[in-house]
Image (spheres, helix red, strand yellow):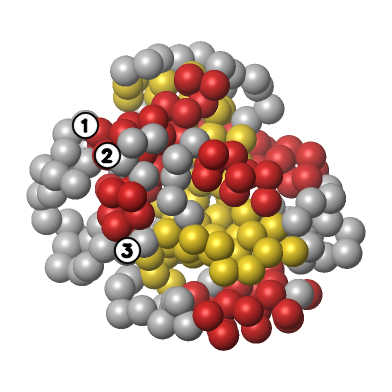
Amino acid sequence: MITSAREPIGVSGLLPENETKPTEGHIRVHHTSPGDSDFTYWLDQRHKYMQKMGWNLESEYDHYDDDPATKSILISDDKDKLIVGMRLTPINGYQSSLSWDMLKTAPHMQQEVVDSGSLDTESPVWDLTKLIQGDTRFSPELSQEAIGRLFGEGLQDSRVAGLDEPTWVFAITKPLFRLLSANGMHLRALSEGRISPDDRTESVFGYVRTIEDLRKSARSSIARTTIGVLSDV
């Protein structure tokens, strides 16, 4: 169970841990952790996505899943088919993240990140991992709403009382980075390339300064949905 205390932040629609609730636009928000009925489905969807991308992992389960501070968020349609999902884990600096570990086979990418100095920050850092799409096709409008809601719930979960706005670091595929950017999300890329010679596509390591970058994205439909979850942004 998550025990981190939070101050009220003027957010409407705050979901208690592990509760599923219908939202406008016929989407549902699921917060899940090991032991929940949704968690097995979440692992299965992650595994399917990894296979689709050609990433061979010994196990889809890792130590982030055992961390009680990890937030696993799924957005589904009203029939509980996954649209998008992601996981957020608080870390002690970006070099202790799993996203950073992914770059061990691409040291030139790690060096580009270090040389940038962009992540020398005092703000809390969260590792965004397992950002995946479900295997069902949905309308662009529903997909955009789902992504916005996903980011809004994630930002809501990662704003811990008494701390500045969180920074999220990530390593995602270049097509997904382009998709989010094309829909108006302000993401900051620090390095890109093939992490492994066998990868089917290039990846991007970067970060989001959450509140600051949402303001820069405010005209996009995804950002408007995200901001709608956070009534005080």
Nearer to me, 196 or 49: 196
Viewer-side label of 3, 2:
2
Give the foreground label among 2 and 1: 2
Q: Amino acid at mark 1?
A: Gly
What x and y, as percent, mark residue 56?
A: 82, 55
Position of 146 relative to 163 (above/below): above
Residue that badge 3 annotates: 166
Query: Identity of the amino acid at label 2?
Result: Ile
Mark 1 Cα-neighbour bin, 10 Å: few <14, some 14–19, many ≥20: few
Q: Earlier in the sequence, mark 3 or mark 2?
A: 3
Q: Quadrant of residue 10?
A: top left
**In this picture, residue 191 sits left or right of residue 51:** left
161 with respect to 41 (left or right): left
140 versus 67 height, above or below = above
Q: Quadrant of residue 203?
A: bottom right
Q: Secondary structure at mark 1?
A: loop
Residue at image point 14% right, 44% down: 232
Q: Position of residue 64 (x, y in %)?
A: 52, 62
Mark 2 touching mark 1, by CB under 8 A? no
Circle 2 residue: 227
